[in-house]
Amino acid sequence: MFWSFFCIRLRFLVFQQREEKQLEASVESLISRVAHVKNALHSFIYKLENEYERLTWPSVLDNFALLSGQLNTINKLLRNEKTPSFRNQVIIPLLLSPDRDEDLAKLTEQRVPVFSHEIVPDYLRTKPDPEVEEQEKQLSTEAARIGPEVAQKQIQTLNKLCSNVLEKLSNPREDREAENAAQRQNKPFFNPTDTNALVAAVAFGKGLSKCRPPGPVAQGHQGQGQMMSGGPTLQQVTIGGGSGQQAGMGGPVAPQQQGQPGKMPSSIKTNIKSASGSMHPYNR
Amino acid sequence: MEAPPVTVMPVTGGTINMMEYLLQGSVLDQALDSLLHRLRGLCDSMEPETFTDHELVYLLKGQQGNPFILRARRSLSHPNTPWHLRYLGQPEVGDKSRHALVRNCVDVATSHNLPEFLNEMGFRMDHEFVATGHMFRKGAMKIVVSKLSRILVPGNTENTERLSLSCLVELSVLAPAGQDTVSEDMRSLAEQLKPLLHLEKIDPSKQRH
């Protein structure tokens, strides 16, 4: 009986040793992975702070991808079967002192110079932050509330959506182009008639007469030879003969401004001619 | 003594002969936001400039057919800035392969009594409109997205109504005569704005009818 007890004890000790070795090995690899992440973050932050102007979005994306890959490897490492469960290990600080510890400072690159009461709650923390804990509690009560069937349905919908998106992404490009082109044709972004109308408006005022009198008034005025701008005025070049009467008043002076700013007097031509012709103001 | 002939030849003498290369298009109001986003990404400078301008077009009827046109423009959003007077010549009928409309352009800034001065000179205002919108720059290229409104009561710029539900988009470059390479840059920018916007050279004389 003593011998069997001894055997069991021996096997337990061996098991413990193997566990310890595994623990050590996994902790070592975890440290090295975390060191990789730290280096990647360090260089990324340096790039963001110093090479801000030259940074392009693809290189930022590359950095993020690198970090994400490294975090993935850490996750895989933790999930590995060979890794003992770290939850079963407890870290107890044996000695806290407010004095500066040179070895610790060198080990942590001057980030933790003192192993004191202030740093213990942050660095040896095992529970999540209070806010995170609160959110987790909310999420778990929410999950418990909706019940298993609803949850299952939601999972199925999510799976279906994901597979749809994956299918669309992996389809050959030509299929996608056809769909896009068909969609785009339904929504025109511009109207060619509008383009022409706007260009005409800017170029020579089509549709933009300076005053818009109602129809009958325009007809009445036109009888006197005044130019009312009922339509595009640039197209009419020769003027009625009635405007010649104003020539007498003009003389060598530029044609007088008409009473209403909206009219287009046609007397320019006739004025200048008459001034240089027989009508000289200083003649008797 | 005849009045000097009103000519449509490019104005020379004293200044470099500047030509304006122009491409025009329009975009519906509902697509305006996406166009502005795209332009903001493609063009220089963070914030586009907005403007509200009142443009008056003055005509001088000459001896022969075509009247002489001058365009006076003032900013309604910055009332103290100088007025802007511009002469645009007839589009050059060069080779058809040139991608943009090319015409002679003379630009000056003037004081605020420009309308009275032009009236005294014999010009008469033909039409006026209010343009409000955004202006973007990319290198030497200028893109103006504007909503045109007609003025209902002459002289009253508050009372306006939109001319159409689209916004006019103009891509222009001011360059000395003979530099045809700018039209290549303009064409590549126009390509990048498709299919939202089709910028093309629209001959205004074809629009008369």
Image (cartoon, rainbow, N blue to C red):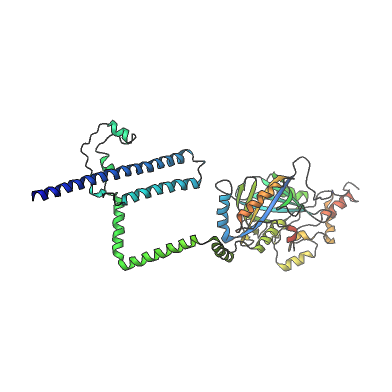
**B130 or A282, nearer to the observer:** B130
**A238 or B183, nearer to the observer:** B183
Q: Position of residue B11 (x, y in %)?
A: 78, 45
Q: Judge from the rendering whether residue A16 lies leftward or rightward of residue A214; answer left or right.
A: left
Residue shown at the point (72%, 68%) measured from the top left: A215
**A107 or B144, nearer to the observer:** A107
Q: Judge from the rendering whether residue A35 lies leftward or rightward of residue B200; answer left or right.
A: left
Q: Position of residue A278 (x, y in %)?
A: 91, 51
- Outermost residue toward the front in this view: A3
Q: Is residue A30 above or below residue B91?
A: above
Residue shown at the point (78%, 41%) measured from the top left: B13
Q: Position of residue B204 (x, y in %)?
A: 73, 58
Q: Position of residue A2 (x, y in %)?
A: 8, 49
Q: Is residue B173 above or below residue A191?
A: above
Q: Dividing the image into 4 quarters, which one contains the C terminus of chain B?
A: bottom right
**A37 or A73, nearer to the observer:** A73
Q: Is residue B195 above or below residue B106?
A: below
Q: Is residue A2 visible?
A: yes
**Residue A173, picture quadrant:** bottom right
Q: Is residue A210 visible?
A: no
